[in-house]
Structures are given as C-alpha cells and as structure tokens.
Image (cartoon, rainbow, N blue to C red):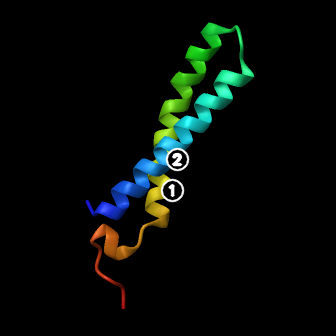
Amino acid sequence: MPKNFVIRFAIVLFSILILAALIIHFSLSEMSRLHILLWIYTVPLSLGLTAFASIIFAKDSELGLPASK
C-alpha cells in the first residue's frame, strides 16, 4: 500500500477513536455497562468510517489503479 494512504488511514482512525473516547468519557460518568456497550459499537463503526473516508479521499495513483481515459 502506498505510504500516503496508510498515513491518512492512521490519522483518520486515531482522530475518530480519540473523539469517541472523549465523548464516551465525558458524557457518561457512572454507567460502566453502558461504557462497554458503547465501545463495542464504536470500534467497528470507527474502523468502517476510517476505511470509507480513506478510500474516498484517495487518488487513483495512490491505490495503484490505472488512470481512466
């Protein structure tokens, strides 16, 4: 995989995870069961959003696709 694509993927992933962690931490104070449930749903969603965003913003040359004529 090209270096730019991997860097973009990592930046988007960490940004989404940090944002989710802050929201979960500060919005819920005492509910530990709800914390666990939210993390179970947040991690797959954040991975999916990261992959989708990285592919949308990638150029054909980064993915190794031939340029369309």
Name the quadrant of the C terminus: bottom left
Q: For residue 8, which quarter of the picture?
A: bottom left
Q: How many callouts does the rendering have?
A: 2
Residue 44 in picture, x, y percent from top left: 48, 34
Q: Amino acid at mark 2?
A: Leu
- Graded by Cα atoms within 10 Å as few (under 14), some (14 to 19) or many (20 or more), the crowding at tag 2 reads some
Q: Nearer the viewer, residue 13 or 66?
A: 13
Tell me the residue that label 1 is attached to.
53
Q: Residue at x 64, y 30 (%)?
A: 22
Q: Residue at x 38, y 55 (%)?
A: 7
From what the image shows, is residue 1 above or below residue 34?
Answer: below
Q: For residue 29, which quarter of the picture?
A: top right
Tell me the residue that label 2 is attached to.
49
Position of 2 with respect to 44 (left or right) is: left
SS at mark 2 in the image: helix
From what the image shows, is residue 48 above or below residue 37?
Answer: below
Q: Nearer the viewer, residue 53 or 6?
A: 6
Q: Residue at x 46, y 41 (%)?
A: 47
Name the quadrant of the N terminus: bottom left
Instruction: Give the Cα distance between marks 2 and 1.
Output: 6 Å
Q: Amino acid at mark 1?
A: Ala
From what the image shows, is residue 46 above or below residue 68?
Answer: above
Position of 32 with respect to 55 (left or right) is: right
Residue 15 in picture, x, y percent from top left: 54, 44
SS at mark 1 in the image: helix
Residue 43, numbered label: none
From what the image shows, is residue 27 above or below residue 52?
Answer: above
- Graded by Cα atoms within 10 Å as few (under 14), some (14 to 19) or many (20 or more), the crowding at tag 1 reads some
Q: Cβ–Cβ below 8 Å for labels 2 and 1?
A: yes
Residue 63 in picture, x, y percent from top left: 32, 67
Q: For residue 34, which quarter of the picture?
A: top right
Q: Residue at x 41, y 48 (%)?
A: 10
